[in-house]
C-alpha cells in the first residue's frame, strides 16, 4: 500500500510540474482568425515564407500600428518600418513583449525566428544587418500582419 501511495505521489508531482507546459504548448498556435487564407495558415502555422515583393505592406507609409493577422496583437509601430530592399516588410524594432524567439536551422545556418507572443504563430526572422542605430532587421511576412492606421 505504501509503495502504491509513493508511486501515486511521485506521478502527481511530476504531472503537476509538466502539465502547465503542455497546456501552454497546446494553447499556442491556435487559429483565432477564421478568415485566414490557406497561404496565411501555411506561413503562420508551418513556418512558411511568402514570395518577396508580394506584400502590399511594402508600400505602406501611413502612421499607425501593425498587428498579428491571427490574434490582433499589436507588434510594430509604423515609425520602426523601413525599406530594407529585401522584398518583405522590415522593421528596426518590435513593441516590447511582442515576440518570442527561437533558433531556426532550416537553411543550414542559425537564424533567429520570431513568433507572436500572444498566439505563437510564425512571423519571420530577425537579422543583425539593420540600420546602424538599432542594428536589427525584423523581416516579416506581410501576410502575417494587419495594418491599422492612426485615426
Image (cartoon, rainbow, N blue to C red):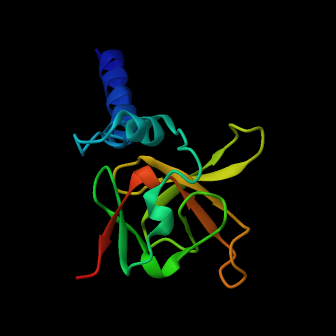
119 left or right of 55 in image: left
x, y percent for residue 23 = 32, 39
Task: Specify the quadrant of the image occupied by residue 117.
Answer: bottom left
Q: Is residue 48 above or below residue 8?
A: below
Task: Specify the quadrant of the image occupied by residue 56.
Answer: bottom left
x, y percent for residue 89 = 53, 62
Q: Residue furthest bottom?
A: 133
Of the 4 image quadrants, the one containing the C terminus is bottom left
Q: Is residue 26 above or below residue 125?
A: above
Q: How many marks?
A: 0
29 and 75: which is toward the camera: 75
Residue at 53 percent of width and 38 percent of height: 48
Residue at 44 percent of width and 70 percent of height: 60
Of the 4 image quadrants, the one containing the N terminus is top left
Task: Specify the quadrant of the image occupied by residue 6.
Answer: top left
67 and 39: which is toward the camera: 39
Residue at 34 percent of width and 50 percent of height: 119
Amino acid at each position: 500500500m505504501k509503495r502504491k501511495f509513493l508511486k501515486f505521489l511521485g506521478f502527481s508531482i511530476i504531472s503537476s510540474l509538466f502539465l502547465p507546459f503542455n497546456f501552454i504548448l497546446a494553447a499556442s498556435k491556435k487559429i483565432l482568425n477564421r478568415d485566414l487564407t490557406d497561404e496565411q495558415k501555411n506561413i503562420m502555422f508551418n513556418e512558411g515564407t511568402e514570395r518577396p515583393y508580394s506584400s502590399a505592406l511594402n508600400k505602406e507609409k501611413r502612421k499607425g500600428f501593425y498587428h498579428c493577422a491571427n490574434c490582433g496583437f499589436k507588434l510594430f509601430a509604423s515609425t520602426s518600418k523601413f525599406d530594407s530592399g529585401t522584398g518583405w516588410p522590415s522593421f528596426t524594432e518590435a513593441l516590447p513583449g511582442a515576440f518570442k524567439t527561437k533558433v531556426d536551422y532550416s537553411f543550414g545556418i542559425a537564424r533567429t525566428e520570431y513568433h507572436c507572443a500572444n498566439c505563437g504563430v510564425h512571423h519571420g526572422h530577425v537579422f543583425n544587418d539593420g540600420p546602424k542605430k538599432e542594428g536589427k532587421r525584423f523581416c516579416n511576412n506581410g501576410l502575417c500582419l494587419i495594418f491599422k492606421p492612426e485615426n
